[in-house]
Amino acid sequence: MTTTFVTAAFCILDGDRLLTVRKAGSSRFQLPGGKIDPGETPRQAAVREALEEVGVDLAGVPDAALGRFHEVAANEPGAFVDATVFVAALPAGADPAPRAEIAEQRWLCIDDELPEDLAPLLARHVVPALRVHRARA
């Protein structure tokens, strides 16, 4: 039986830069986000995860739904991720820093060539969709 993790995440943007994180024990960078808890909406889960993982409170920040994407999981061999992804600007005065299971964070210029160490969901689906989203804005 194939495992699918239902998750939610935020594209936190500072201009043309996207915040990515690497969880402890992983070599792949992904978005701040994680599994949706029982009773949570995808947005509530994404807000909770952003606060837990990088200390950024997006509860009152305007955002847009980027989409829902399905791809192989970066950190779970043989599993898939079904992610609902939102986009928000980094709030004024916010200073993201790795917390909880996050070992490292890195800003990525979304217009540049993508590094090889991105999670498949981010490289194959989210960044291309984010580029289209920004072009329409």
Image: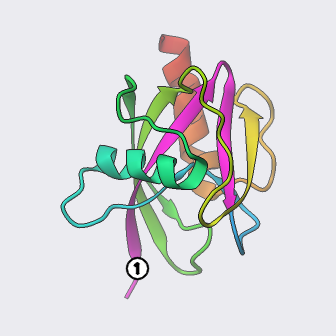
User: In the rendered image, is residue 84 in sight?
Assistant: no
Report the residue at 54% width, 44% height from top. Answer: 125
Tag 1, which secondary structure? loop
| Foreground of the two, 9 or 54 | 54
In this view, the residue in front, 79 or 15, is: 15
Q: Is residue 83 left or right of residue 23?
A: left
Q: Is residue 51 above or below residue 93?
A: below
Q: Position of residue 17 (x, y in %)?
A: 70, 28
**Quarter of the image where one finds residue 75:** bottom right
Magenta stretch prevailing secondary structure: strand
Q: Amino acid at mark 1?
A: Thr
Q: Quadrant of the N terminus?
A: bottom left
**Quadrant position of residue 74:** bottom right
Span colored in magenta:
1-22
- Reply yes or no: does residue 19 show up in magenta: yes
Residue 6 showing in the rendered view: yes
Can you identify the residue that label 1 sits on?
3
Q: Position of residue 40 (x, y in %)?
A: 24, 56
